[in-house]
Image (cartoon, rainbow, N blue to C red):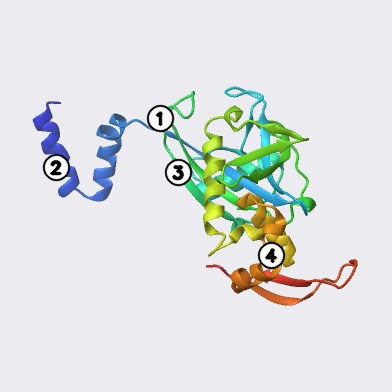
Amino acid sequence: MKFKEYAEEKKYYEQEASQEEFLKWYQKQDLPKYEKPSVTVDNVILGWDEEEVKLLLIKRKANPFRDHYALPGGFVDKKEDTTEAVLREVQEEVGITLDESYVEQLKTIATPNRDPRAWTITVAHLTYLPDMQAVKVTAGDDAREAHWVTLRADREGIPHLFFKGEEIPLEELAFDHKEIICEAVHRIKNRLDYIPTVLQILGTTFTLTEARKVYSKFLGVELDELDNSNFRKTHGKFFTEIGFETKPVKGRPRKVYKLKSLT
């Protein structure tokens, strides 16, 4: 078909034909002209083990990046939205059933050649898991292993990952998962003073000391640099006091708080 004939036909179907007629024409004439990327999801899943922020990583059992650490994730099915894909992939790869309310979209990344297989766009997500210690992680699907690793940021906001006392170099992570983890830490750190959603990893209730510990891990400071009284003055507006600890503790029971709605 000559260009002039094509242009006239295109104008007719776009401006005069019914939508049903247009879609049939488009799928036959125009759609094949466009490159089609694959779409994936990746998920930064954070938890808390009483002293450290934890990040869930898998070790890939297949190429590309076989035996490299990676974030849980995978390809989006044709009839899924990206959040549905996140929930399914996490269930398949690490055996966790996520509550959608703890999942938020982080960033869409379409960097050319980010996946050596083909043109792939990923939608990265960030998940706050409030009951990490009650969850059993089991490797499945594309995962050879699944591990909770320690996540700490330095004063410049650069994340560092540790497993069994050894640091995991960010440069050795699969795909561009270093960039995704850095983006997650950047978002959390920048929100600490106005929307500290990361405190959801502590569960439904927490003490001020526990909140300070989480803050210290993302600010790259020692706990004693965040004075308890000053912290309550500057960040108490985000919390609701609900009573005292009920579990046995040495000394006076500490006050317990819950996170106010931040939406």
Which residue is at 53% across, 41% downward? Answer: 180
CB within 8 Å, label 1 to label 2: no
CB within 8 Å, label 4 to label 2: no
Question: What numbered label is drawn on residue 108?
Answer: 3
Distance (Cα) linking label 4 and label 2: 68 Å
Q: Is residue 53 left or right of 15 when viewed as pictured?
A: right
Question: First in sequence: mark 2 or mark 3?
Answer: 2
Distance (Cα) linking label 1 and label 2: 33 Å
Distance (Cα) linking label 1 and label 3: 13 Å
Q: Is residue 217 left or right of 165 when viewed as pictured?
A: left
Determine whether the residue tagged by mark 1 lies in a helix, strand or loop.
Answer: loop
As shown in the figure, which amino acid type bears the numbered disc 3?
Answer: Thr
**Where 111 falls versus 185 (above or below)?**
above
Residue 51 is situated, as x and y percent measured from the top left of the image, at 76, 52
Question: What numbered label is drawn on residue 11?
Answer: 2
CB within 8 Å, label 2 to label 3: no
Q: Residues within 10 Å of mark 1 (few under 14, many from 20)?
A: few
Which residue is at 87% across, 67% downward? Answer: 247
Q: Which residue is mark 1?
A: 112
Q: Looking at the picture, tell me which residue is in the foreground, 203 or 89.
A: 203
Distance (Cα) linking label 2 and label 3: 33 Å
Q: Looking at the picture, tell me which residue is in the foreground, 30 or 122.
A: 122
Question: First in sequence: mark 1 or mark 2?
Answer: 2
Q: Which residue is mark 4?
A: 227
Distance (Cα) linking label 3 and label 4: 37 Å
As shown in the figure, which amino acid type bears the numbered disc 2?
Answer: Lys
Q: Is residue 71 left or right of 11 when viewed as pictured?
A: right
Residue 215 is situated, as x and y percent measured from the top left of the image, at 64, 57
Question: First in sequence: mark 3 or mark 4?
Answer: 3
